[in-house]
Image: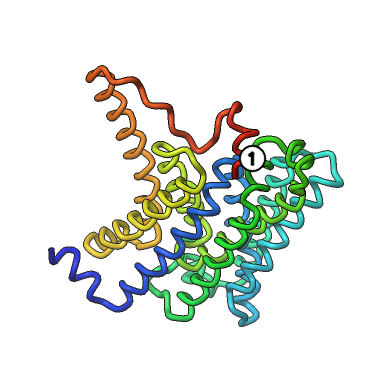
Amino acid sequence: MTWLTDPLSADFMLRALLGGVLVAAICAVVGTWVVVRGMAFLGEAMAHGMLPGVALASLLGLPVIVGAAVSAMVMSLGVGLIARRGRLSSDTSIGLLFVGMLALGVIIVSHSRSFAVDLTAILFGDVLAIDTGDLAGLAAALGVTVLVAALFHRAFVALAFDPRLARTLGLRPRLAQVMLVGLVTLAVVASYGAVGSLLVVGLLLAPAVAAGHWVRRIPAIMLLAALLGATAVLGGLLVSWHAGTAAGATIAAASVTLVAVSASGRRLVALVRARAGAPPAAPSTAVLTAPDQKDAIVAL
């Protein structure tokens, strides 16, 4: 068991594990709704769109998390403004802002040669550098995420399946959409320091997708996704320690690997049940089927 105990005997590894677990929990809650709503492109655009704010904050000597938050808010506000006042689709609006923000970030970075090392941390994170202050911030972000998700749960469900019914039930779908985009922004900004702007999408999507192979109810998907995300964090850190690989990238790769393992396991269970003559289990996905929509909105 020395392969497990030796890495975790280091204080920085324990902080990295705890920070990664907090990130996994945040991403599990938000990522479930991202998968249900088909908002993966928005999450990716948010992650990449933080680059100009981070670069400017570094040049001005400000905390990079402040720059990341400002850029993410600009992205979310810009997407909403273009979608409401323009004639472009949501995907087109996100794509244009994503390219524009990323290009602006590269332009800012290109003006300073001193970004050669810092850019790697911006893109791929430095989970091993998490300190107690970062842990406190992640814990606060998790608390806010869980609170908002609980308060707007019925509205999020209604928004996912029938916005018109949500409006009829007085669930204010427009406000729910704003809060959901806000949660995505919070998850991306809070997680970026641990796994970087390019790799945060892995923890945001992969555990939720893997969990969706086994359970259907949204709260159950969130809980299982948090467990799978924590497993990916632990596995990624151990592989990184023993193989000498980048910790953030290894964690993201482990989380994506979980999707393939989960899908294969689900197919294997179905095959075994079929050979045993048992009735096939209902397919588990992260999205409720159409007949369930009204009952789900009223019940949840």
Mark 1 surroundings: few (<14), some (14-19) or many (≥20) residues within 10 A: many
Q: Residue at x 47, y 34 (%)?
A: 285
Answer with left or right where residue 151 lies relative to residue 260. Answer: right
Name the residue at 62% across, 67% down. Answer: 68
Residue 226, percent across and down?
A: 42, 54
Please report the residue visible at 75 percent of the width from the left and 57 percent of the height from the top.
77
**Is residue 54 shown left or right of residue 261?**
right
61 lies above or below 216 = below
Quadrant the N terminus occupies: bottom left
Q: Relative to 263, does residue 25 appear above or below in the rendering?
A: below
Residue lying farthest to the right in this orientation: 85
Q: Residue reaching furthest front?
A: 299
Quadrant of the image for the C terminus? top right
Could you say which is closer to the camera, residue 8 or residue 119? 8
Amino acid type, residue under disc 1 in the picture? Ile
Count of marks, rendered view: 1
Circle 1 — which element? helix
**Can you say whether 47 is above or below 12 in the image?**
above
Task: State the residue position of label 1.
Answer: 297
Query: How has the structure been colored for display?
Result: rainbow
**Residue projecting furthest to the left:** 1
Residue 211 place in picture, x, y as percent: 42, 43
Residue 113: percent from left, percent from top: 55, 72
Residue 146's spot in the image, x, y percent? 55, 61
Quarter-wise, where is residue 110 in the image? bottom right
Residue under the image location 42 percent in, 27 percent down: 282
